[in-house]
Image: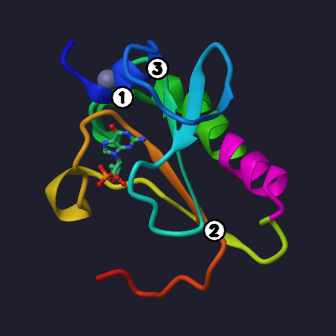
Amino acid sequence: MDCIFCKIAAKEIPARVAFENERLIAFHDLFPQAPLHLLIIPKAHYSTLNDVPSSEASLLGEIMDTARQLAADHGMAADGYRVVMNCNKHGGQSVDHIHLHLLAGRQLGWPPG
Ligand code: 5GP
Ligand code: ZN
């Protein structure tokens, strides 16, 4: 499949990997929007959040839990951080393999543009 994040998960494209297990991989965003900007993805391909069945809700939970742990591992838990999953055009999704952004290390603005 011609999916850049599947290729990162398969180590066919290099990335700065921060965490990995059998189901997930977390790596640094190529164009970081904050001092810490990680992408946490399932190794299984789901194009958008719309495509994840409710039977895989535990996978979504594990992605969120991993973001929380990575924020703590990087010393960002107390100051805070943001997790974002964009979906489709209005959400601003540009890579069609679900990914949770973990942004930390500076004051983030709200609301998003
Ligand atoms: P989206 O806009 O879909 O929510 O986020 C996609 C993110 O993937 C963007 O922040 C973009 O910088 C990042 N990205 C796109 N291509 C690559 C790549 O080849 N490697 C890495 N590490 N990040 C990428
Ligand atoms: Zn994929």
On screen, 42 above or below 44?
below
Q: Secondary structure at mark 3?
A: helix
Measure how far apart labels 3 and 1 are at the Cα level: 6 Å
Magenta span: 66-75
Q: Secondary structure at mark 1?
A: helix
Quarter of the image for residue 23 reads: top right
Q: As shown in the figure, which amino acid type bears the numbered disc 3?
A: Ala
Q: As shown in the figure, which amino acid type bears the numbered disc 2?
A: Ala
What residue is shown at x 64% (from left), y 13% (from top)? 22
On screen, 105 above or below 58?
below
Q: Are marks 3 and 1 in contact (CB under 8 Å)?
A: yes
Q: Position of residue 30 (x, y in %)?
A: 41, 48
What is the residue that sits farthest to the left in this orientation? 89
Q: Position of residue 88 (x, y in %)?
A: 20, 51
Determine whether, in the image, residue 29 is placed left or right of residue 49.
right
Q: Position of residue 34 (x, y in %)?
A: 53, 69
On screen, 2 above or below 19?
above
Q: Quadrant of the C terminus?
A: bottom left
Quarter of the image for residue 53 reads: top left
Disc 3: which residue: 9
Q: Using a 10 Å C-alpha cutoff, classify the residue at mark 3 as few (fewer than 14 neighbours), some (14 to 19) or many (20 or more).
A: many
What residue is shown at x 35% (from left), y 41% (from top)? 49
Compare residues 33 and 85 and report the one nearer the observer.
33
> For disc 1, does the CB lie below 8 Å from ligand 2?
yes
> For disc 3, does the CB lie below 8 Å from ligand 2?
yes
Disc 1: which residue: 5
Please tell me whether residue 38 belongs to the stretch shown in magenta.
no
Disc 2: which residue: 104
Q: Secondary structure at mark 2?
A: strand
